[in-house]
Image (cartoon, grey):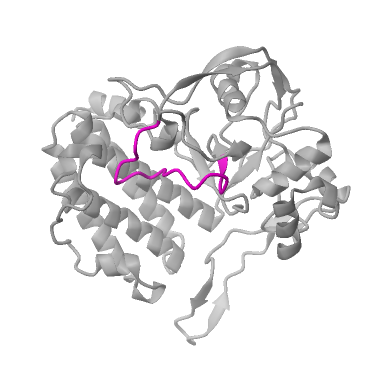
Amino acid sequence: MSRAVAVVAHGAADDPHAIRNAGRELLSLALIEARNHLLARLAQDESSATARRAALHAGWFQEYWIARHLQRQRGEGCDAAAPRLAGIEPCIDGWIAGADAGLPDAATLRAVLAETLDTSLDLLARCPEDDSALHVYRNALLHEDRLCERLAEHLRDGAPPARVEREPIWLPARRWLLGSAAGPQAGHVPHNERWAHEVAVPEFEIDAQPVSWSRYVEFASDGGYDRRDLWSDAGWAWVEGEERRAPRFVEQMQGGVMVQGRSVEAGLRRTAEAGLRRTAEAGLRRVAAGQPAMHVSRYEAEAWCRWAGRRLPTEPEWEQSACTAGSRGFVWGDVFEWVAGSARAWPGAPAQAPDCLDGIPQPGTEGVLRGASFATLARRRHPKARRFALPVADTMFCGFRSCTF
């Protein structure tokens, strides 16, 4: 690849629209970048079982759906039950299914990751340039990008930017095409975005940015965690059961928000010198008042909205704002954002593919997060993207914004 072509390809690798239609050259570059990113995250805490399991899953997923998958060129039309070739590493299936004690050491893991990537790239170089044949490679890239994000959440590495508070934005009523459009140029579209359908969106006012810590502290200081009337039945049961008085990882809210520092190990580590078990601590750090409130559960977001006399935006409202109101100050991508409604398929959605990463949960069981976080790679910052999570989920880099009634 020439220098000029490489520069163009590198730019396209960061483009959330181009990556969905990526061909062999762009996919090869992006897969290498993703693996390097994953290895860099792993190196920050490679003794952690959580980190090693996430990294191992990246190698296993590529091997299972690419190297061992005889029907890989059929893409979403493959038979998931069809026989597969033997694995490069005979223990990998057991590692994936087994307990943490069965995980490989860091050196073995890095060797597995190198070999699985080399095999994927070799097969990709001989792959036809069509959507069906490229599907497994595009899906493997999406999977690895999300694992990198999960490792950032495990490490609690980095923070969203602090922003000056801006006035809410009013948007007029209109018809909106919700979801991603089908067609020959659709490329690799996650299952929960399929397919675009028109909805009526009444006029509404929406926050220009997610709710900041300074605004969230007012809710907590006003007894937000003690007022039963602000919480749903399930939310109040969660507050009492968890004995919550602040979002996850927050240690202090009076006189400034103090959160637990960067996680070196999410659980317990064994020191080589004494064989003792200890919890790695990184102390406390102060967060800027203008940063978005983070690690907020869906229940907390709803309670804050009731306290403020506001509500969570609907998916059409959020998506319309993200796609059309950027020039008016609408900022997204600092944290994932809870929206109103429960996780569901869009009308007319097809049956999910065997390697689907975004399956539709049982009705009413999970909530919806829109947008991206500061840890999300540029190529995954798509305004149509959706994530599903339980209402109690708060280990993600998640927050929320509000609308008027």
Q: Is the residue 348 above or below the residue 394 in the image? A: above
The x and y percentages for residue 148 are: 42, 49
- Residue range (magenta): 349-368
The x and y percentages for residue 282 are: 62, 64
Q: Please identify the dominant SS of the magenta region.
A: loop
Q: Nearer the viewer, residue 385 or 342?
A: 342
Q: Is residue 360 magenta?
A: yes
Residue name at image x 86 percent, y 51 percent: 227
Residue name at image x 35 percent, y 22 percent: 182
Q: What quarter of the picture does the C terminus occupy?
A: top right
Residue name at image x 50 percent, y 52 percent: 152
Is there any visible trace of residue 106 in the rendered image? no
Q: Quadrant of residue 11?
A: top left
Q: Seen from this angle, which residue lies furthest right?
A: 222
Q: Nearer the viewer, residue 55 or 231?
A: 231
Q: Is the residue 148 above or below the residue 13 in the image? A: below
Q: Quadrant of residue 302?
A: top right
Q: Seen from this angle, which residue lies furthest bottom?
A: 274
| Total count of labels | 0
Lateral position of residue 102 relative to residue 344, left or right: left
The x and y percentages for residue 86 are: 14, 61
Q: What quarter of the picture does the N terminus occupy?
A: top left
Lateral position of residue 291 relative to residue 155, left or right: right
Q: Quadrant of residue 94?
A: bottom left
Lateral position of residue 382 relative to residue 173, left or right: left
Q: Is residue 68 magenta?
A: no
Is there any visible trace of residue 393 in the rendered image? yes
Lateral position of residue 98 relative to residue 207, left or right: left
The x and y percentages for residue 5 are: 24, 25
